[in-house]
Amino acid sequence: MDVRTQILDVATRRFAAQGYGGTSLSAIADEVGIRKASLLYHFPSKDELHRSVLDQVLSRWNEVLPRLLAAGSADRFDALLHETVRFFSEDPDRARLILRETLDNPVTMRERLLVAVAPWLQVIAGYVRRGQESGEVRADADPEAYLLHVIHLVVGGLAISDTLGIVLSPDGASSDIQRLTRELERIAKVSLFTDEGIERMNGRRAAAHAGSH
């Protein structure tokens, strides 16, 4: 892992845990194992590092969503949901960062989300509406509001997964994040799809799996 990536990883964790005001460049440099001057070579200011950390998380969807949306017509929503859950569960600090920034800097985050999320929200909502027309998606669902609730469910749930998980494993042996994410995906799907839609989805998945062997 190169130095710039190490800086971003440490900064993501510290900004998520302590917020912008509670995080110092010196502390980030010390954890990475470099001098502060070396950090400033890569990121000329704390503001620049902070922007880069947020950009790294939010720009993920500009890389992932076009590929998933173009990957055939079957079960795009399922693929998008799974990828979103996977992205935040593999590093819950990403979710904690977004949650903290939303609470600490709502105006700035609103502007960022309008740029990074809003355009894709409309595209995915279009797929949901087509699912309503085919009978696979519940007719009373509000596509945009539903998708925002799912984002909130994923980000909020995984941001506090360590705390929630300990309830599942009181001995502290494991946060059991897999149980949390499986149930999160189940809730998201059954609240959107009709029984017929879920049956069709399972059929397509089985057919695709059989075709790959």
Image (cartoon, rainbow, N blue to C red):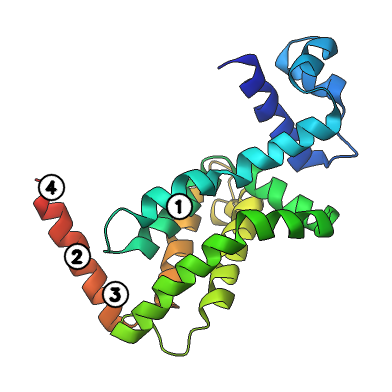
Disc 2 marks a residue whose amino acid type is: Arg
At a point 85% along the width and 24% down the height, the residue shown is 25
Q: Quadrant of the C terminus?
A: top left
Residue 12 visible from this viewpoint: yes
Q: Is residue 132 above or below residue 150?
A: below
- Name the amino acid type tagged 3: Ile
- Provide the residue designation for mark 2: 204
- Mark 1 to mark 3 CA distance (whole Å): 22 Å
Q: CA distance from mark 4 to mark 1?
A: 23 Å
Tell me which corner region of the image, top left, top right, bottom left or bottom right, holds residue 190.
bottom left
Earlier-in-chain disc, 1 versus 2: 1
Q: Mark 1: which secondary structure? A: helix
Disc nearest the viewer among 2 and 3: 2
Residue at the spot of label 3: 198
Q: Establish if 31 lies above or below 211.
A: above
Image: 204 above or below 97? below
Alpha carbon separation for disc pair 4 and 2: 12 Å
